[in-house]
Amino acid sequence: MGKFGAMVLLSVAREVRAGAGDRRPIAVAGARELVPLLARELREGGDASAVREGGPPDGAAVVVWLGKPDDGALRAASLAHAPIVGVTEGESLPYVLDTDLVVVRPGEGLPIDEIAHKIAAALGERGTNLAARLPVVREAVVDELIRLSARKNALVAAAVFVPGVDLPVLTLNQARLVLRIALAYGQEIDRSRLPELLAVVGTGFGLRALARELLDFVPVAGWAAKGAVAYAGTRALGEAARRYFRSVRSGS
């Protein structure tokens, strides 16, 4: 990579660090008897200030609504452009997309893992700060970061037909993914992380070389092969980064 490549990667690190995610808390609202229970579950082992019980929706990164609908409150959250995750016994809630709904049948407990994944999906790449502060949502946020990055790289690889042109974009996307995962695990991003980034770039070059070989074998469907390799490779890289930064955080 050389000095120029290192400078580029440090620039990416600064970019990712500057946009390290939404620093506002999760707001839990709705059924009074359930709000403290879910808030306690989401805070477990983390920063209590990252979860708020009630309050104005425009001060929240995402609103988790529990129980029966309150049209006024849900409309206020929608007008504030706050993503809403609904947890309810019904099949729908006003102002909540069906994809953001967690249906809980009578007598069932709160499905914390499913709620965490809905929160992560609502936040997308903005979830890194909350992931660093809340272990309960961390793995779900990392899942979402990997999914989004793999999908993005698959689209780039499939759309670019000139050999090598997609390489810088793919490798920079992979570097951003690794950095975001590091932030999700509360790891500081500085020059000491440069070897890890250089390893990412090396992996990216290896994946692109494999994709070009596949293109030679299947020229008609080469775009699909390139997309599949980029997707699978980015996912594999993300999972490796997850394992690494998880072990760093745990000290193992």
Image (tube, rainbow, N blue to C red):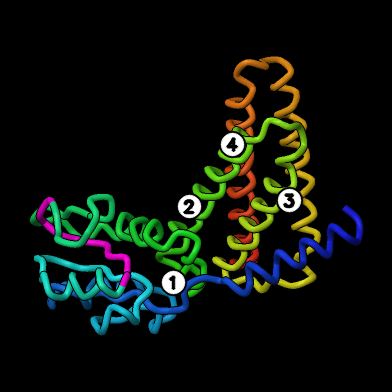
Q: Are marks 2 and 4 in contact (CB under 8 Å)?
A: no
Considering depth in this image, is 45 or 182 the residue closer to the camera? 182
The span picked out in magenta is 81-91
In this figure, which residue is indicated by the disc labeled 4? 232
Which residue: 75% across, 57% down?
197
In this figure, which residue is indicated by the disc labeled 2? 143
Which residue: 10% across, 54% down?
90
Of mark 1 and mark 3, the one earlier in the sequence is 1
Question: For residue 35, which quarter of the picture?
Answer: bottom left
Q: Residues within 10 Å of mark 4 (few under 14, many from 20)?
A: some
In this figure, which residue is indicated by the disc labeled 1? 134
In this figure, which residue is indicated by the disc labeled 3? 200
Query: In the image, 34: left or right of 127?
Result: left
Of mark 2 and mark 1, the one earlier in the sequence is 1
User: Looking at the figure, which quarter contains the C terminus?
Assistant: bottom right
**Tag 4: amino acid:** Ala
* Residue 208 vertical position relative to residue 234 in the rendered view, above or below: above
**Percent from the top left, x then y, of residue 6?**
84, 61
Query: In the image, 70: left or right of 211?
Result: left
Considering depth in this image, is 139 or 54 the residue closer to the camera? 54
Given this view, does label 1 or label 3 mark the residue nearer the observer? 3
Q: Secondary structure at mark 2?
A: helix
Q: Is residue 85 magenta?
A: yes
Of mark 2 and mark 3, the one earlier in the sequence is 2
Q: Calculate the distance from the C-alpha at mark 4 to the C-alpha at mark 1.
A: 28 Å
* Residue 245 vertical position relative to residue 75 in the rendered view, above or below: above
Which residue: 68% across, 46% down?
170
Of mark 4 and mark 1, the one earlier in the sequence is 1
